[in-house]
Amino acid sequence: MPYSLQVSVPASHRRLIFVFNVAAASVILIVFLRDLLMWKAV
């Protein structure tokens, strides 16, 4: 996320954005690991 955009975001929304980023990263990681396990199983 651009720094200029982050500055314009209120402090109360930064926590929400942080939680959203963590959730998105965890979903991507889970999908990546699942695909990796399926590839190894083949």
Image (cartoon, helix red, strand yellow):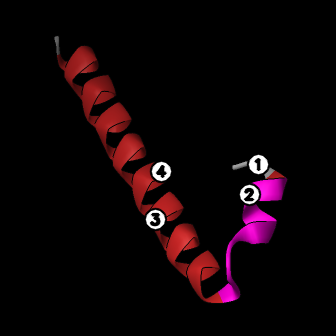
Residue matched to label 3:
20
Residue pictured at 20% horizontal, 23% vertical: 38
User: Looking at the image, is mark 2 or mark 3 nearer the viewer?
Assistant: 2
Residue matched to label 4:
25
Q: Secondary structure at mark 3?
A: helix
Q: CA distance from mark 2 to mark 3?
A: 16 Å
- Considering only order in the chain, which callout, 3 or 2, is on the residue closer to the N terminus? 2
Marks 2/1 in contact by CB < 8 Å: the verdict is yes
Residue pictured at 42% horizontal, 53% vertical: 24
On-image quarter of the C terminus: top left
Question: What's the mark number on residue 5?
Answer: 2
Three-letter amino acid code at the position of disc 2: Leu
Three-letter amino acid code at the position of disc 1: Pro
Dot 4 alpha-carbon crowd within 10 angstroms: few under 14, some 14 to 19, many 20 or more? few
Question: What's the mark number on residue 16?
Answer: none
User: Looking at the image, is mark 3 or mark 1 nearer the viewer?
Assistant: 1
The x, y position of residue 11, in whole percent, is: 69, 86
Which one is nearer the viewer's eye here, 10 or 23?
10
Q: Secondary structure at mark 4?
A: helix
Residue 12 drawn above or below residue 13: below
Q: CA distance from mark 4 to mark 3?
A: 9 Å
Three-letter amino acid code at the position of disc 3: Phe
Which one is nearer the viewer's eye here, 13 or 39?
13
Q: Is residue 5 magenta?
A: yes
Question: What's the mark number on residue 2?
Answer: 1
Q: Secondary structure at mark 2?
A: helix
Judged left or right of residue 22, residue 35 is: left
Residue span colored magenta? 4-11
User: Looking at the image, is mark 4 or mark 1 nearer the viewer?
Assistant: 1
Q: CA distance from mark 3 to mark 1?
A: 16 Å
- Considering only order in the chain, which callout, 1 or 3, is on the residue closer to the N terminus? 1
